[in-house]
Image (cartoon, helix red, strand yellow):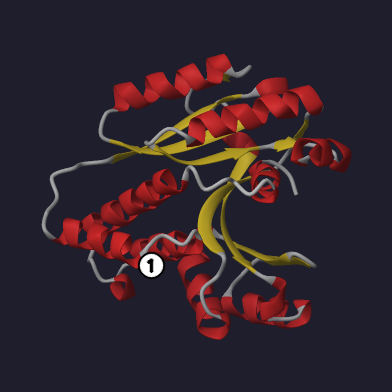
Amino acid sequence: MAGHSQFKNIMHRKGAQDQKRAKIFAKHAREIYVAAKSGLPDPAANARLRTAIIAARAVNTPKENIERAIKKAEGGGDENYEAVRYEGYGPGGSAVIVEALTDNRNRTASDVRSAFSKHGGNLGETGSVGFMFVRTGIIEYPAKVADADTMFEVALEAGASDVASDKDGHEVTCAPDDFAAVRDALTEKFGDPLEARLDWKPTTTTALDEDAAATMMKLIDALEDNDDVQSVSSNFEVSDEVMAKLSA
């Protein structure tokens, strides 16, 4: 795996220490609030809200947090968040896309620019690195839910474009327009996925040595620590040897 998936695997091995759990819950609650406010507050009739709830459950967001965010949207909460995308370069010339939900574009842009500057990168113009990625629907399941052939058959019948299975699990990919249908079909067959999201998948990768990879991890950590940032995608790649050192 390349890019942010690799980084997430490293952080999971380190245990993530749960100190950021409240911040993570708050980010998911914000996405649920925005999804419920921008459409119907019923997940059965709102695909974006269903996706947000599944993502929140995947990180064990308390049920009351989810319900509170939906009720807040139903009650006409006065917070207005805008979706903003930032693009830039990280250590070693790696490409980075940052997606945010913000009620203050100037504050968020300043914070994101500062994170890039402090960690060996620089913020670019919109479109500066986007051509190196393709928007992709990604649905992940643990290996135990099905064997590779069964997952492949069910996923492709639902409209997926590809399935990658190994001992760690299954990663189903699909076009953005097919995402809701594929996710719902798989959920009906196998239950809630570990993750279901629209992501930026790199079409080309940039290899980083140990020093650059360590700095990249700090950059991603700094970006994700920002309350407004919802997701970070990158095209960096590291060798198994480097990843083992970073995971130690």
Q: Is residue 175 above or below residue 141?
A: above
Q: Is residue 123 visible?
A: no
> Hey, which quadrant is residue 53 in on the image?
bottom left
> Hey, which quadrant is residue 168 in on the image?
bottom right
Q: Is residue 231 above or below residue 67?
A: above
Helix, strand or loop at disc 1?
A: helix
> Hey, which quadrant is residue 37 in on the image?
bottom left
Q: Is residue 137 above or below residue 15?
A: below
Residue 206, horizontal then vertical, whole percent: 75, 32
Side of 30 where 239 appears, left or right = right
Side of 196 where 120 appears, left or right = right
Total marks in image: 1
Residue identified by numbered label 1 = 50
Q: Nearer the viewer, residue 177 or 28?
A: 28
Residue 70, horizontal then vertical, whole percent: 24, 62
Q: What's the residue at 25%, 57% (across, down)?
A: 69
Q: What's the residue at 51%, 57% (across, down)?
A: 197
Q: Is residue 191 visible?
A: yes
Q: Nearer the viewer, residue 38 or 222?
A: 222
Residue 116, horizontal then vertical, whole percent: 54, 20
Q: Residue furthest right?
A: 241
Q: Amino acid at mark 1?
A: Arg
Q: Is residue 234 above or below residue 153?
A: above
Residue 230, horizontal then vertical, whole percent: 44, 43
Side of 114 where 89 appears, left or right = right
The C terminus is located in which quarter? top right
Q: What's the residue at 71%, 28% (across, down)?
A: 214
Q: What's the residue at 26%, 71% (across, down)?
A: 42
Neighbor class of circle 1 (other Cα within 10 Å; few <14, some 14-19, many 20+) is: many
